[in-house]
Image (tube, grey):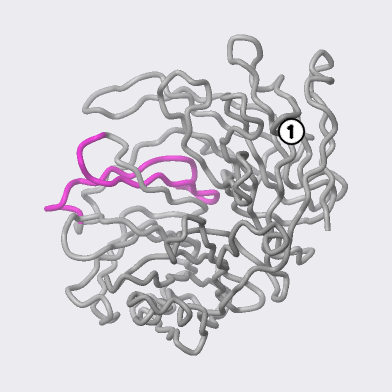
Amino acid sequence: MAGIGLLYSNAAENQNKIPLNAWKRHTIDDKSVGADGVKSVDWNQDGNLDWVTGWEQGGVIRIYTHPGNDPERLHQPWPSVTVGEVKAPEDAVFVDLNHDGAFDVLSACEGNEQALFVHWAPRTAADGKLSTYLDRNQWRTERIPTSRGATRWMFCEPAQIDQQGGIDFFSGSKSPNAAVGWWKSPACPEQLEDWKYIPIQKAGWIMSLMVEDVDNDGDLDCWVSDRKGDNRGVYWMENPGPSMADQGDAWRRHDLGGKDLEVMFLDRNDLNGDGMCDTLVATRNSQWIWFKAVGIGSQGRPEFVELRLRNPFGMPHGKDILGADLNGDEILDLIFTSNTEGTRFRPGVNALMGQPIHKAAPECWQSISISGPEGIKFDLIEAVDIDSDGDLDLITCEERDNLGVYWYENPLIGQR
């Protein structure tokens, strides 16, 4: 089934720059309910990204294996495996927690479950028996005991946080007891009762966690977007270094702004091509924020100015924002997902097509509908050349109209 994308411009003088286009929608899976986010890794090392999704209402965690470059197989549902069944999953991410060479999955649950789970991959998958990775009977699911009932877990991001032992991970949650924190890997990661949780910042409702060495001091910091409560806004948490990382109060918060808005998912990208990485965030307030990098301040910390711009198509409830070059002109475009409730016939997946920064301000960029009116509640979106034809396609999910997990085929290359 195809979602039809109609291209038009916010500015009359740009109306005919790109012709009318249709983005075809190809379903990967629509056999459960409430697909909630997509994250990737190349688990079988075939050069193509594979994906994992938690289905919130369906209560399952599924992996989707890229079927290769045969168009017929790409346009059909992909090979998949249900790696675990948990209640109200909000997030799922690949990570090899036990260092056996096979990617496990970490899931975060809210609702009444309120727990973090590890879905352990079959060890034989790491020994070259890749077929066992797609055998659901070979997977086992275990709860991290100390996570149960603590809060509504929303997001996890693996990282080597303290430069010691195995892979750790950041977590974010929403009330009650909402916080940003990190989980310290024990000597034996499969002993889940030995994982140590270190809260580093009180929160309201965490949307994004993104790992980066922001201040170039050799350790990994964490970008955060928090949409609710007294602590909301966009900020980053400064890692105090290996010797102090497990002291929660040693982490320092650096605010960018957005405290008066309901900020959603964020992206880090060089929007204006000046060589400095900006911070972009969607909001549920009819606008998106460009935290424009303007230089490096004391102790290597970046400095920003805050710019607010209207959403394409007047969408009030933004969800995700992503910078990517969709049409191959070497200028960054911006892709948006939204919740279309109350604006049912506007496109929930759309984009602003970038113009040279010296010719047009972002609010004058061309608006393009990618999804058309189909779908209501969209989530994280990623730009990947799924069909290996030289342009960036888009993969996302939708959880109200049950469009499921799917990708949009890019029609723009060669049509500029």
Percent position of residue 132, x then y: 46, 82
Q: How many marks?
A: 1
Percent position of residue 313, x then y: 79, 35
Which secondary structure lies at badge 1? Answer: helix
- Is 97 situated left or right of 399 in this image? left
- Is 337 situated left or right of 65 in this image? right
Quadrant occupied by the N terminus: bottom right
Q: Residue furthest right?
A: 345
- Assess whether residue 345 is covered by the magenta stretch: no
Percent position of residue 402, x then y: 76, 66
Relative to 414, say whether 348 is above or below. below
Quadrant occupied by the C terminus: top right
- Is 381 situated left or right of 351 in this image? left
For the point 69% across and 31% down, which residue is it? 352
Of the pair 280 and 366, the residue shown nearer to us: 366
Magenta segment, principal secondary structure?
A: loop
Relative to 151, say whether 45 is above or below. above
Relative to 17, say whether 197 is above or below. below
Which residue bears the numbered disc 1?
312
- Assess whether residue 232 is covered by the magenta stretch: yes
Of the pair 260 and 163, the residue shown nearer to us: 163
| Residue segment shown in magenta | 216-245
Percent position of residue 341, x then y: 79, 53
Crowd rating for badge 1 (residues with CA inside 10 Å; few <14, some 14–19, many 20+): many
